[in-house]
Amino acid sequence: MAQESIIAPYAEVHRPENLRGAGDGRPTAIQIIEDEHLINKWSDKTVLITGGSSGIGVETARALHATGARVFITTRDNAKAESVAADILANSPSKVPIEIVFMELGSLDSVKAGVEDFRSRSDKLNILINNAGIMAAPHGHTKDGFELQFGTNHLSHFLLTKLLLPTLIASSTPEFASRIVNLSSNGHLYHNKGGLTPEVFADLDFKQTPYNEWAAYGRSKTANILHANRLERLYGSSPDHPVHAFSLHPGGITTALWRHQGDMVATRLQGFASIWKSPEQGAATSVWCAVAKVWEGKAGRYCENCQESVPVQENPKMGDPGYGPWAKDPVAEQKLWEMSEEMVAPWLK
């Protein structure tokens, strides 16, 4: 795709010479809402955000709540979520209550129970933001025996999305198609070179190769992109009830996502200070994918810096924009979908 044809309304403030680090001129999530003229304009819409009580999930919820939409946030800490919801509500132009759904993404039983809880309270869902995740965690497994990062970052959201698709489809109209937003990372590029190859699929649990926390993270983030691609392929072209799916890199942000890395946070922040974002800025691309009018009637894409992304240049440096060719691999996309369906089949009954 030619550079001039990409959707990039905030390109100027993201030029390298304009970057000054967290809090610079790059847009925040609430600025996206303001720029789209959506303050208290979405009283007819319902949004669900995973991990809405920490990190950029909080700022995503804060911005989308300002639209007047009915906002649900998932959490594994109800007390923390209640505190976050109270803070958002106290400072938001909308007074619609924020609703909390308990969901432990390391347990597919918990994901299914959370979906049932949501469905008991709402028969509508216009926006699903698969935001929650873990990064570079020590080798471990979910409660269901899946490698921890793949299971948490991909499989839990695969099941969640699969169970909520009927509601997303029913809520979609030609005037406003439902949207699914998967948070990926440029970690798919730097920590998973080559993508989900047959060898990777054959050893998702690192039984045959030594565990590497960054490789595992990269696999899960590649899966987030391929999942969105498959959703778009299967559901985006419906004439009456389309569902569009996006994936994105939110940028480098200091949040609890880094909790497994200790002193590396300070090192990364120092080395890439100019491109680092505040949590408010880090949530902007998620919100842009979820609400921007420019996407109405268009297929979902992989995005970063509040714009459509482009293929990565040769020999990229850490922090360079773009996606790897394996993020557009239709063979891996289909294989991942089929394997994921098999893995979560017991929870689809």
Image (cartoon, rainbow, N blue to C red):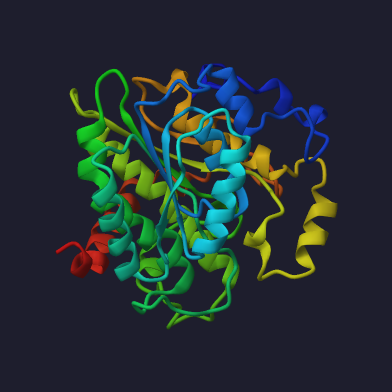
Res 251 → quadrant:
top right
Above or below, 341 relative to 178: below
- Which residue is at a point 75% across and 70% down the rendered structure image? 262
- Which residue is at a point 19% across and 23% down the rendered structure image? 239
Q: Quadrant of the C terminus?
A: bottom left
Q: In this orientation, which residue lies closer to the viewer: 68 or 326?
A: 68
Q: In this orientation, which residue lies closer to the viewer: 200 or 348?
A: 348
Q: Is residue 293 left or right of residue 304?
A: left
Q: In this orientation, which residue lies closer to the viewer: 59 or 236?
A: 59
- Which residue is at a point 40% across and 62% down the rendered structure image? 103
x, y percent for residue 190? 61, 55
Q: Is residue 201 left or right of residue 294?
A: left
- Which residue is at a point 71% across and 47% down the rendered structure image? 317
x, y percent for residue 145? 36, 79
Q: Is residue 276 visible?
A: yes
Q: From this viewpoint, which residue is outermost toward the left?
A: 349
x, y percent for residue 55? 62, 52
Above or below, 180 relative to 212: above
Q: Is residue 265 left or right of residue 10?
A: right
Res 158 → quadrant:
bottom left
Q: Is residue 59 visible?
A: no
